[in-house]
Amino acid sequence: MWVVNAGSGRVLQSNGNSEASIRKHFPADTLINTFNRDHLMHWAPDLPETGIAIIVGGDGAWREALQGAPEQVRPGLLPAGTLNQAAIDLKTTASVKAWRIWRYERIQLGHVHAPGHAGTNQNVFFLMAGVGVESDAVRLVRQGLKRRIGKWAYVWALFERLIRPVRPTIVVGMDGRYFRTSQVLIQNAAHYGGHYRVADTDVHRPDYRVLIWKYPGRFMWCLTMMCLMFGLPSGWLAHQFPGGHVRIRSSGKKQCQLDGDTGPALPLCFTPTTAREIAIADGERGGSK
């Protein structure tokens, strides 16, 4: 079954794919369209009892599918979003034809919940979670601008956010230690913002990394992010810890970001990853079904 996220059409066409291409190569498969941002979170009634469901969309659609799909369904991904960060860390392809052959993999998902509500109303994340300047910027991204200029809409939103002061209003607690900061990233994937490797981790390993900015201010925020993204020495700018139970609160109203989409408001608890089986296109590498 194919699930096409609303808004993916422009990227599908630019990759030489389309819904028509899906129907041509997989005429017997079911194809459904999502209608709004939260449709994938409540998609269980549309699914078969078992099998795979290939999500045609970006990182946000992929995260919603991982959160909404029942355990017996293995979600796959045809990247058709703006950044397609998940495709980089999964090493998957944007080719419809590649799904003629597929295989299973096990990945790790991080969990997010309000304090005292573990096990209920949990959100998940696959790539990263963040609180601070970049999560503020994600909230400022205009969808109309994003459709017109793609990833540059995120750059524009970040510029808008950096006009305002960058203060250490966030408190991060883990293993009995507390840190006041302007930015924290919880990296389940190695890469951030494209092909920039910022953490020694992997989506297949149960060990996300927690990156905590040491210094406030616009200049120090930008310097820390640049050092992380370009592989420059950053230990003097950011704490880096192996994953565990992380609690984050703020003295002001803050929301987190989960895989590049705006998530729930603070305070929040982030808990260690759990495994999930997914489907991966293998048609361009000669794998077997």
Image (cartoon, rainbow, N blue to C red):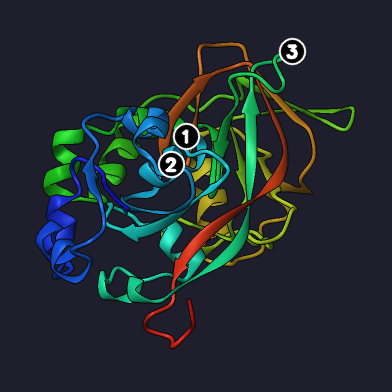
Q: Is residue 111 visible?
A: yes
Q: Residues within 10 Å of mark 1 (few under 14, many from 20)?
A: some
| The disc label shown at residue 166, or none | none
Q: CA distance from mark 3 to mark 2?
A: 25 Å
| Mark closest to the chain's N terminus, 3 or 2 | 2
Q: Using the image, determine if residue 213 lies above or below residue 267.
A: below
Query: What residue does disc 2 label?
Result: 65
Q: Residues within 10 Å of mark 3 (few under 14, many from 20)?
A: few
Q: Using the image, determine if residue 57 lies above or below residue 138.
A: below
* Disc 2 element: helix
Q: Is residue 137 visible?
A: no
Amino acid type of disc 2?
Ala
Q: Residue furthest right?
A: 176
Q: Residue furthest bottom?
A: 286
Q: Residue at x 41, y 44 (%)?
A: 48
Q: CA distance from mark 1 to mark 2?
A: 5 Å
